[in-house]
Amino acid sequence: MKFELRRFLLLFALVMVISVIAACGNGESDDSGSEGSEESEAAENTEESSEESGEEIESLSMGFIPSSDAGNIATTAEPLEEFLSEELGIEVEAEVMVDYSGLIEAMRTQQVDIGFLAPFSFVQAEERADVDVILKSVRNGSESYVAQYVVNADSDIESVEDLVDQEGLVWAFPDTLSTSGYLFPAMQLKEMGVDELESHFDQLSVGGHDNAITQVYDGQADFATTFDDARVTVEEDLPDVMDQVKVIGNTDEIPNDTISVRSELPDDMKQQITDAFMSLNENEEMLEIMYEIYEWDGIAEAESEDYDIVREVYAEFESDLNE
């Protein structure tokens, strides 16, 4: 009888121990689940906080479009890369893009941080990629430039008015997307009374400002429109071009090329980039690099409103350009 009572008590005690262990195990499991939930929530809060405080930038890319005489722009831009990397404390790398459309798309997808955009391309990029303009170039002490009309020195055409009065003239220009080579002159000609450019002129798209000058020099075109003064681009091959090709008029002022940044770049980084580029004005060596790349003499701060006149021209030709 005593033996059975003792066995009963031992079994009862064993059951109680197992119950306590199980209860403790369940408690630990519940605590662990609670900790996991809290950690997950904290991670989410940290991510949200990171987004609110801005993107962490580890490197920057600059997008360039080669000019007619800067096929080795990546090599030319290396000192600029090094200077900006030191100023900003992060790696800055230049990327050579095929064309402005590719650069705009790269900025839209946040793949390129800084874009060197021509006035018309900036207006497109602002519309399509929501880029922000921060700076513009200074050339010959000016923050703007003009397009020019040129004819052969032997031509009887003396003014832009003569172009409006005569039909069937051969007009050479770089391409229809060129701000100074086509869009601004085309707008001016329309305002002066040319209703249909295509029927009034025999248009000749020649793929470059230098080519447009050459067409006039060789007598293949009656007149050409280019940036001012594009004659220097062919002077090495045509030493007498200044005598053989004359300027008969100019367009209104056009704001200079831009330095623009992608839309999602944090504001503090935009300001640091602005400050770094503005410091180039005090650095003769870097200004020489900028001149070699794009013939810039200096850099000035820019606002979107500076390009309103470009938007007006773009609006006039938008339907044709987007076909």
Image (cartoon, rainbow, N blue to C red):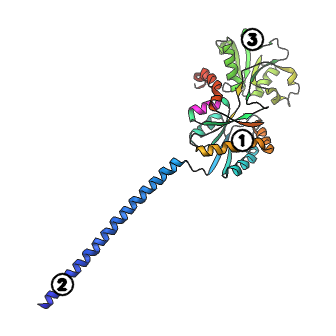
What is the spatial separation of the Cα atoms under label 3 and label 2, in whole angstroms?
A: 120 Å
39 displayed left or right of 225: left
55 displayed left or right of 164: left
Dot 1: few (<14), some (14–19), or many (≥20) neighbours within 10 Å?
A: some
According to the picture, the residue beneath numbered tag 3 turns out to be 161
204 displayed left or right of 311: right
Q: Position of residue 245 (x, y in %)?
A: 83, 21
Q: Is residue 7 above or below residue 269?
A: below
Quadrant of residue 256 in the image? top right
According to the picture, the residue beneath numbered tag 1 turns out to be 278
- Residue sitting nearer the eye, 131 or 112: 131
For marks 3 and 2, the one nearer the N-term is 2
According to the picture, the residue beneath numbered tag 2 turns out to be 9
**Which residues lie in the magenta part?**
120-127
Quadrant of residue 98 in the image? top right
Of circles 3 and 2, the one toward us is 2
Q: Say whether residue 204 is visible.
A: yes
